[in-house]
Each structure stands twice: as structure tokens, then as C-alpha cells.
């Protein structure tokens, strides 16, 4: 049984350009991994990106989603509002497994993505989310962020 919203056609992301997706289609692309909510550090010398295990203060560690999604830009002014127009500028900051990035790059969604599996928990079952291993931003002093850098690139 699929849990995909009935208004969404299977495989729509393969046929429609990102800028032609409905709001429901756009929002459904998010797999709920929570990786975009992790604090990222950029090396000022070479521009390399490092993810930390520190999650935004609005992050809900159980759902791996923003706890204040509709108000996030007001509550966290540095939060990036992902849109078809902004995606190109921030794609390199998005995880390599991010559906928005994959579709932008002309690649398909992985089998564990909820739009493919029909199960919103498949991202967690596949071990592709940050569920269970983040630290809230408000528990770490900014000068200690580097102590929480993750090895490799997500």
C-alpha cells in the first residue's frame, strides 16, 4: 500500500521541471532526512564544506523535520527557503542524497525515498536520516562547533 498523497502522480519528478511543480509536489520531494537542518561550516581558506551533528534549534529530532516550518524564516533568519529559484545557488550546500539536488542534477530518486517506497519512514529504515544522532544547537557553544564536524560529506 502506498502512502503517497493521491493527488501526486507517480514519477512526476522525472517528467516535470522543478519550476513547474505544484506546491504539494515540491514539498513531497523532501524525504525528511533532516540533513539540511544540520549546522554546516565553511572553511574560509578553501571554501570546503563540513557538516556537523548539530541540528538547528527548530529541528524536531523525532520527525527529522522543522518544528516551526511555517515560521522558520522569521525565527531563524539564516534559514534558507528552498525554492526552484534558490536551489541552484545552494545546491552544493545540500546533501548529495537530497531529492531537490538529485532532480536538479537530472538524477532519479533512490529506492528508499518515500515517493518511491510509499512509506514516509523508509528514509529512516534505510539509515539515510539524522534521526537519533544529532545535538541541538542550543546545547553547543559556537566556539565548539568544530568539535562536532562529521567525517566525510553527507
Image (tube, grey):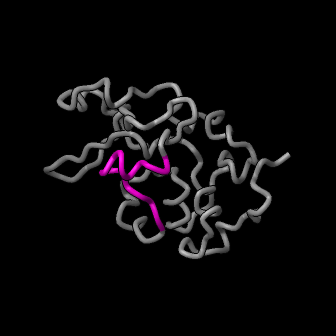
Q: Position of residue 10 (x, y in %)?
A: 76, 62
Toward which corner of the image does residue 38 lie, by quadrant?
top left
Q: Is residue 52 magenta?
A: no
Residues drawn in magenta: 69-83
**Observer-nearest of 133 and 22:** 22
State whether residue 5 is above or below residue 18.
above
Q: Position of residue 136 (x, y in %)?
A: 38, 28
Q: Is residue 129 above or below residue 30?
A: above
For residue 110, side relative to residue 153 (left or right): right
**Identity of the residue drawn at 45% across and 36% down:** 59
Position of the C terminus, as image quadrant, is top left
* Left or right relative to 112: residue 49: left
Give the total number of marks visible in the rendering. 0
Position of residue 91 measured from the top left corner of the image (x, y, whole percent): 40, 60
**Residue shown at 70% from the left, 53% from the top:** 115
For the point 22% across and 26% down, the residue is 141
Q: Height in image: 84 above or below 139?
A: below
Amino acid at each position: 500500500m502506498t502512502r503517497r498523497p493521491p493527488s501526486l502522480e507517480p514519477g512526476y519528478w522525472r517528467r516535470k521541471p522543478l519550476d513547474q511543480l505544484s506546491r504539494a509536489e515540491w514539498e513531497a520531494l523532501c524525504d525528511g532526512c533532516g540533513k539540511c537542518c544540520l549546522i554546516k561550516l565553511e572553511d574560509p581558506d578553501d571554501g570546503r564544506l563540513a557538516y556537523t551533528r548539530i541540528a538547528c534549534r527548530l529541528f524536531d529530532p523525532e520527525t527529522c523535520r522543522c518544528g516551526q516550518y511555517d515560521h522558520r524564516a522569521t525565527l531563524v533568519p539564516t534559514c534558507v527557503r528552498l525554492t526552484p529559484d534558490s536551489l541552484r545557488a545552494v545546491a552544493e550546500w545540500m546533501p548529495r542524497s537530497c531529492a531537490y539536488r538529485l532532480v536538479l542534477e537530472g538524477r532519479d530518486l533512490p529506492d528508499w525515498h518515500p515517493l518511491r517506497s510509499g512509506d514516509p519512514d523508509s528514509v529512516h529504515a534505510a539509515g539515510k536520516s539524522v534521526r537519533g544522532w544529532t545535538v541541538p544547537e542550543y546545547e553547543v557553544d559556537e566556539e565548539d562547533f568544530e568539535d562536532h564536524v562529521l567525517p566525510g560529506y553527507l
